[in-house]
Amino acid sequence: MNGLPFEERMLFGTMVLLVLIGLSNLYSALHLWGGGGHMALFWLQLAWIAVGSGIGWLLGHYDYRLLHRSCGRWHLIATTLLVLVLFVGRDISGHRSWFAIGGFGIQPSEFVKITTIFVLARFFTDHLQPHGFGLRDLWEPLVAAGGPALLILLQGDLGTTLFMLLVTASMILFAKLRRGTFILFLVVFLTGGGFAYQKVLTPAQRGRIVTFLNPEEDPQGRGYHLLQSKIAVGSGGWLGRGYLKGQVNKLRYLPEKHTDFIFPVLAEEWGFFGSLFTIVLFFTLITLGLTVARQARDRFGGLLAMGMTFWLFWQVAINLGGVLGLMPLTGVTLPFLSYGGSSMVVAFVAMGLLISISRRRFLF
């Protein structure tokens, strides 16, 4: 560790802190008063962390520039899995998004998030437009990102679809758009959003938006999740109730507390300062990602690092925005904290690639 550059030490140290916080918080979320918890999920999470950390370590030593040639194949594989899961996947909470393999569940949409970033980084590396990209210039990246996003929408996963659109839009804006194209995209987004709300979204998905605007309208139904989340966060106060003492969690009022609503568990037990410390750790990772992107030795490395940073930012923003009532609930996980094998592995992939880009910026 002492021989590593500062950015790499910070990336590694911040990631380790988040993993440790995530494990301790997951244990509390699964440990219920009076028994009846699901501690087997804790051990599964440990197994996924072992797998993810191994992959992340390998990627940290891997030359990310080799992805420039192979990223199309990885994206094709991930997209093919999205098609297959529609036919043979397991249906959970109305989403047909998982392959069931033994006691494990694999979610291809988590992996396609990363492979989409790969192909977008390669496209914007190979196609330079000093004056900005026009609409006709962008058909290839729009198809590469839009195809998987449509497949994910067909699975019923609106949150991941929204995430894909936000990451794609972020990378396109970073690569630079012509002013007229930007205005056109903005108009399409605003008008398309209204059309999608009326004609595309299911009643349950529209209900999430209504609940976001007024959760008190149906406190025992659609608004229950969000209201309990707010109660858990607010009851933590400044210092929290103490570890393993969160009443909203332990009395089983908080639903999906090991996945989507893992942050309210933390907020109730560790309070404002514990929550703030965790958010600062995420902010540190995002800042380091921007630093790695800025210092990358080539355009592909810079775009790849920006994509990983956008991935982290939108994952955190969408999850926290949902559980705090700042935006509709979407089901997007919180990196390193939420239970989930696929999302945990992808988080390590993102960090491993950032370390790979960082350590090669001084190679000539």
Image (cartoon, rainbow, N blue to C red):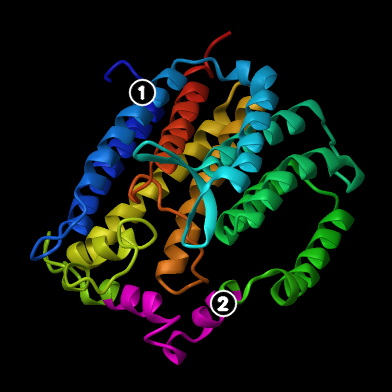
Magenta stretch: dominant secondary structure: helix
Residue 145 horizontal side relative to residue 53, left or right: right
What is the residue that sits farthest to the left in this orientation?
34
User: Which residue type carries mark 1?
Assistant: Gly
Quadrant in the picture for residue 138: top right
* Residue underneath mark 1: 54
132 in relation to 275, above or below: above
Nearer to us in this view, 344 or 2:
344
User: Which residue type carries mark 2?
Assistant: Ile
**Residue 125 in view in this figure:** yes
Residues shaded magenta: 206-231
What residue is shown at x 75% (from left), y 73% (from top)? 199
Badges 1 and 2: C-beta atoms under 8 Å apart? no
Badge 2: few (under 14), some or many (20 or more) residues near its Cα, within 10 Å? some
Q: Residue 349 location in percent, x, y?
A: 46, 31
At mark 2, the secondary structure is helix
Nearer to us in this view, 219 or 118:
219
Taking the magenta stretch, the answer to whether it contains residue 211 is yes
Q: Residue 214 location in percent, x, y?
A: 49, 87
Q: Residue 345 location in percent, x, y?
A: 42, 35
Taking the magenta stretch, the answer to whether it contains residue 60 is no
Earlier in the chain: of badge 1 and badge 2, it is: 1
Quadrant in the picture for residue 181: bottom right
Q: Residue 133 location in percent, x, y?
A: 85, 43
Label 1 – label 2 distance at C-alpha: 39 Å
Which of the labelled discs sits on residue 209, or is there none? 2
Badge 1: few (under 14), some or many (20 or more) residues near its Cα, within 10 Å? some
